[in-house]
Amino acid sequence: MDSVGVAAAAPDAGPGPAWQGKCPWGAPSTTSISCSLADVMSEQLAKELQLEEENAAFPEVVAAAEGPFITGENIDTSSDLMLAQMLQMEFDREYDAQLRREEKKINGDSKVSISFENYRKVHPYDSDSSEDEVDWQDTRHDPYRADKPTTTPRRGFIGKGKDITTKHDEVVCGRKNTARMENFAPEFQVGDGIGMDLKLSNQVFNALKQHAYSEERRSARLHEKKEHSTAEKAVDPKTRLLLYKMVNSGMLETITGCISTGKESVVFHAYGGNSATEDKVIPPECAIKVFKTTLNEFKNRDKYIKDDYRFKDRFSKLNPRKIIRMWAEKEMHNLTRMQNAGIPCPQVVILKKHVLVMSFIGQDQVPAPKLKDVTLSSEDMKKAYYQILSMMQQLYRECNLVHADLSEYNMLWHDGKVWLIDVSQSVEPTHPHGLEFLFRDCRNVSQFFQKGGVAEALNERELFNAVSGLNITADNEVDFQAEIEALEKMNEDHVQNHGKKQSTFSSDGDPPIYDE
Ligand code: ADP
Ligand code: MN
């Protein structure tokens, strides 16, 4: 579409600063685009604006480009988008630097200072300006949502109460400010202004101070342990950006390293930070479970989620990437149910796409040992057994869940008790294979404790009945399994005929209880 060159209002509010033309990389066309009505209708322009918006969505790439995940050596240039974002950020920072120089020059000796804050491309507070897709988590209290950057109101003074600084103090104060620049981190370039009789306005000083601090934090992160980079390389660029957002938003203090690399997930340890929101208390230590986005790993797990009625409707409509997020979402919901029932398990902190942050079971970066790795006294072993028996019952009755991957690998020994983890595959008992999963869980638990010398440990069939409350009488494994499958089949038929699922199983002819 040909555009007739009648300049209309720029799409961005307000004109850009006057120095735009002097930018070494040419006038940045993104700040103020003059366009005609024809342009407004143009698809090309729409695309450009879209791109601009997408670029603006990743201000943290600055940190990402320098942080431990993406350093000079291990920089991942395989993603064009990532590369483009990083270049854009470099450009934006250049632009901001120029802006600051200009701001400084203009404000130099003047009594009234002008702030270019609003023209900045990389805003220190703007930790997450957009999400490309909607998260499943309730986003009403999204701690990532950045507040609007605040600007100092135009008034004749700065500060409050006794800290008030009026224009009369301007000279003294300006000199002080200049001197205080010495306190900035040594790497922070303040120019040779310190040696001169330069009077820096409070506003400019504060802007510089803020910038110096964020630079300092950035640089601290950069020099943090680099040895974890191998595990971190297993995480794709999008995930790295997500993790950086968590650190940059202050929700996490640092991500110290990888605890576990499994087939379907990578788990990191992190120290909790101070969340941007007051209503969320971040545990001092966190575990970050990153569900792997390599799709083939998940194919064999389809049966857990495909038939879970809670996810059934969505399953058919979703693309594979979203199905992976569903695993993370399932883990979050299941953990929450368990938490509510008082079962010892990690507490959910936040879910972001396929990344689940929860409380860390362990201490000082050392995860609690798995039950399979810990040697317990016979007394503790017995205690653990009874605890697990009661947790399995609680899980089934109060949480309406079957763990479905319960074994000594997914139970941690911490604080003298057993903690359940890894519940992304957990299902409700009425799942078409729910009882089979439960039976397998019972087999694992009963074998572990019988081998571990707990004489009181029920065998797998007894345990199954004790947990489910069903009364399957078969005295051998094959018949028992057949009865389980018959029950599942009955339930499925019921769903087919009534379009409603039974909320509980009943083996002794009682009328089934239905969901409301
Ligand atoms: P996977 O599907 O890879 O088995 P898990 O949830 O079992 O995922 O986590 C893998 C390992 O990471 C666990 O065996 C445990 O050692 C560690 N881990 C996971 N979550 C936590 C947590 N909240 N606290 C401490 N360690 C954890
Ligand atoms: Mn596991």
Image (cartoon, rainbow, N blue to C red):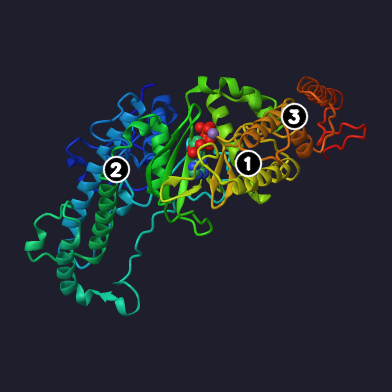
Q: Is residue 81 left or right of residue 417?
A: left
Provide the secondary structure element on which disc 3 rests. Answer: helix
Task: Give, as a three-letter code, the residue at label 2.
Answer: Lys
Whether residues under marks 2 and 1 lie with C-beta atoms below 8 angstroms apart, the answer is no
Q: Is residue 246 left or right of residue 485?
A: left
Task: Estimate how packed mark 2 is, as few (under 14), some (14 to 19) or many (20 or more) residues with alpha carbons within 10 Å.
Answer: few
Residue beneath disc 1: 333
Q: Is residue 465 above or below residue 127?
A: above
Q: Is mark 3 within 8 Å of ligand 2?
A: no
Q: Is residue 477 left or right of residue 67?
A: right
Residue beneath disc 3: 435
Residue 388 location (% of width, % of height): 66, 43
Q: Is residue 343 above or below residue 325?
A: below
Task: Estimate how packed mark 1 is, as few (under 14), some (14 to 19) or many (20 or more) residues with alpha carbons within 10 Å.
Answer: some
Task: Give, as a three-letter code, the residue at label 3.
Answer: Leu
Lower position in the chain sequence, tag 2 or tag 1: 2
Residue beneath disc 2: 225
Most distant residue in the bottom direction: 162
Provide the secondary structure element on which disc 2 rests. Answer: loop
Residue at image location 21% in from the left, 47% down from the top: 97
Q: Is residue 367 above or below residue 43?
A: below
Residue 117 vs residue 289, the one in the foreground:
289
Whether residues under marks 1 and 3 lie with C-beta atoms below 8 angstroms apart, the answer is no
Lower position in the chain sequence, tag 1 or tag 3: 1
Residue 471 vs residue 51, the one in the foreground:
471
Residue 465 vs residue 108, the one in the foreground:
465
Task: Give, as a three-letter code, the residue at label 1.
Answer: His
Question: Does residue 36 appear in the picture of this structure?
Answer: no
